[in-house]
């Protein structure tokens, strides 16, 4: 009878996750509701709606018209080169949404969503509500970064397998098929290319400097823009920080942080189990570290108290894994996403171009990569991965996607020790975030000369968007008003 109750509970969680269209942890998302093409300004305007004055046909922006879903915003298309070096012909049209207050006293506030692979324009209505207290001073602008939204890179098999996660392991065939489908142009979808697009956007907007507010992967894009164009940045808000040195494809910081996060959650809900010890027991007994880390990290989007996960880990540690298996299945189902919502093709292309892996960069010979990964995993100790194991570190989707990605010319990256320019910076994190653990914020702080830090107790990923208290949002508002 108990097993039947747990199966039913698992199905309830599956339905809840699916209905919520959850963004899985590795995707580093700002959750929200996607718009159709007709809503994002690419279709006819709704009668009677007002928007900002048309941006005109100059400066790379064209087709300006009132955004049909959000009054007071103009939607337009930014035309950028496929290859900013000019060596390969072609252009891309990137959707942009701009608030009407072009003369806002503090200038442009460019909000960068996450992924990589998530569009920006579909979230402008939600962000305009969240950021309302400062939008008399700032002109909110959002953009669909290259390879996202209406121009999403399409890799159907990889999309189906990974949804909105970058921890769920894909098959080798899905990765190779994606790389082959994108072809040589996949080399034009790294963060360097997006940074160049953002500079083109700044020029098209006709402003000298911008304030950038990024969430998750958006923080990495923002810092990379600041490193490339320091004189063009007024201030930075970095929410759920991916450090400028890049993410760790083994996700070791999150593995080590899991006991801390679970113990804090347990204390908050008054649980009577030992979730950190249960986690270690489960991984050791079942060898399911990848599934557990994927599910745990995603659960921060559902419940920053991790209550169901704490119960499931306790039961699994005591020999009954049914509830944990149901939650994992529910997470996988609930993390489904279309390429227009989060493009896994763009996700893989960007991570593989930007990343540093045990085998090196994206141009490393494919035949040498597996041996290099095995060697790196063999050198790990429990001090590196905490309650997990080396098999987890080498088996995550973020690693496997690039292990099998076709060799591609590697773009230049900034020096790892290079510091951000001396502009005001707010580093924001939830102390229960396993997607971008607070340890990553501390890594970025070392390279940030004028950092203010706000760590929000009880919050998980994407503090501005998802935290249940206003402390993080108020910290952002105060920073934007006063800096």
Image (cartoon, rainbow, N blue to C red):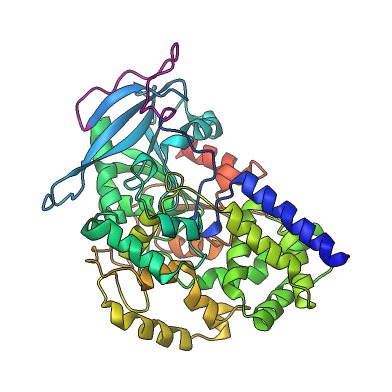
Between 161 and 389, the residue placed more toward the observer is 161
Does residue 3 appear anywhere in the picture? Answer: yes
Q: Residue furthest top?
A: 48
How many numbered tags mark residues here? 0
Quadrant position of residue 300 = bottom right
**Above or below 226: residue 310:** below
Between 178 and 313, the residue placed more toward the observer is 178
Q: Which residue shows up at 39% across the image and 22% down it?
A: 101
Locate residue 58, reporting x and y percent.
19, 26
Q: Is residue 184 left or right of residue 439?
A: left
Indicate the quadrant containing the N terminus: top left, top right, bottom left or bottom right: bottom right
Q: Is residue 436 left or right of residue 118?
A: right
Q: Is residue 336 left or right of residue 405?
A: right
**Above or below 289: residue 109:** above
Magenta-drawn segment: 38-60
Magenta span: chief secondary structure: loop
Q: Is residue 41 magenta?
A: yes
Locate residue 280, reporting x and y percent.
68, 78
Q: Is residue 92 magenta?
A: no
Q: Residue furthest left?
A: 87
Locate residue 456, reporting x and y percent.
62, 52
Indicate the quadrant containing the C terminus: top left, top right, bottom left or bottom right: top left
Between 104 and 51, the residue placed more toward the observer is 51
Q: Which residue shows up at 34% across the image and 60% down it?
A: 178
Locate residue 41, reporting x and y percent.
38, 27
Q: Which residue shows up at 33% across the image and 48% down it?
A: 147
Q: Is residue 55 left or right of residue 357?
A: left
Quadrant position of residue 14 = bottom right
Does residue 379 appear anywhere in the picture? Answer: no
């Amino acid at each position: 009878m108990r097993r039947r109750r747990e199966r039913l509970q698992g199905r309830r969680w599956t339905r809840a996750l699916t209905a919520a269209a959850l963004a899985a942890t590795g995707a580093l998302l700002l959750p929200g509701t996607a718009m159709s093409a007709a809503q994002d300004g690419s279709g006819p305007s709704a009668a009677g709606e007002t928007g900002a004055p048309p941006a005109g046909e100059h400066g790379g922006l064209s087709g300006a018209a009132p955004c049909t879903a959000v009054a007071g915003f103009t939607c337009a298309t930014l035309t950028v080169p496929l290859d900013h070096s000019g060596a390969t012909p072609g252009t891309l049209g990137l959707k942009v949404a701009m608030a009407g207050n072009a003369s806002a006293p503090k200038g442009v506030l460019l909000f960068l969503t996450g992924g990589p692979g998530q569009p920006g324009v579909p979230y402008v209505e939600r962000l305009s509500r969240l950021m309302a207290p400062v939008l008399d001073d700032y002109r909110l602008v959002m953009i669909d970064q290259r390879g996202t939204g209406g121009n999403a890179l399409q890799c159907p098999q990889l999309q189906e397998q990974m949804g909105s996660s970058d921890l769920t392991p894909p098959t080798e065939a899905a990765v190779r098929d994606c790389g082959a489908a994108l072809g040589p142009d996949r080399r034009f979808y790294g963060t360097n290319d997006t940074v160049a697009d953002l500079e083109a956007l700044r020029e098209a907007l006709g402003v000298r400097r911008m304030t950038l507010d990024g969430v998750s992967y958006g923080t990495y894009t923002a810092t990379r823009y600041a490193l490339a164009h320091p004189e063009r940045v007024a201030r930075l808000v970095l929410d759920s920080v991916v450090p400028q040195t890049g993410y760790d494809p083994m996700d070791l910081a999150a593995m080590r942080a899991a006991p801390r996060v679970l113990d804090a959650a347990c204390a908050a809900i008054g649980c009577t189990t030992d979730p950190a010890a249960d986690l270690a027991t489960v991984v050791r007994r079942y060898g399911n570290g990848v599934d557990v880390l994927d599910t745990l990290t995603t659960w921060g989007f559902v419940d920053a108290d991790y209550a169901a996960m704490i119960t499931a880990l306790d039961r699994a540690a005591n020999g009954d894994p049914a509830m944990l298996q149901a939650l994992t299945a529910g997470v996988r189902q609930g993390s489904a996403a279309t390429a227009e919502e989060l493009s896994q093709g763009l996700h893989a292309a960007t991570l593989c171009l930007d990343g540093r892996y045990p085998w090196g960069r994206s141009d490393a010979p494919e035949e040498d990569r597996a041996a290099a990964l095995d060697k790196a995993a063999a050198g790990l100790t429990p001090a590196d991965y905490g309650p997990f194991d080396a098999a987890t570190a080498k088996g995550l989707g973020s690693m496997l996607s690039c292990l099998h990605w076709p060799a591609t010319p590697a773009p230049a990256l900034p020096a790892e020790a290079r510091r951000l320019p001396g502009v005001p910076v707010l580093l924001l994190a939830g102390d229960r975030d396993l997607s971008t653990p607070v340890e990553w914020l501390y890594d970025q702080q070392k390279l940030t000369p004028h950092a203010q830090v706000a760590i929000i107790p009880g919050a998980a990923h994407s503090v501005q968007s998802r935290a249940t208290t206003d402390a993080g949002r108020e910290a952002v508002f105060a920073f934007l008003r006063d800096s």
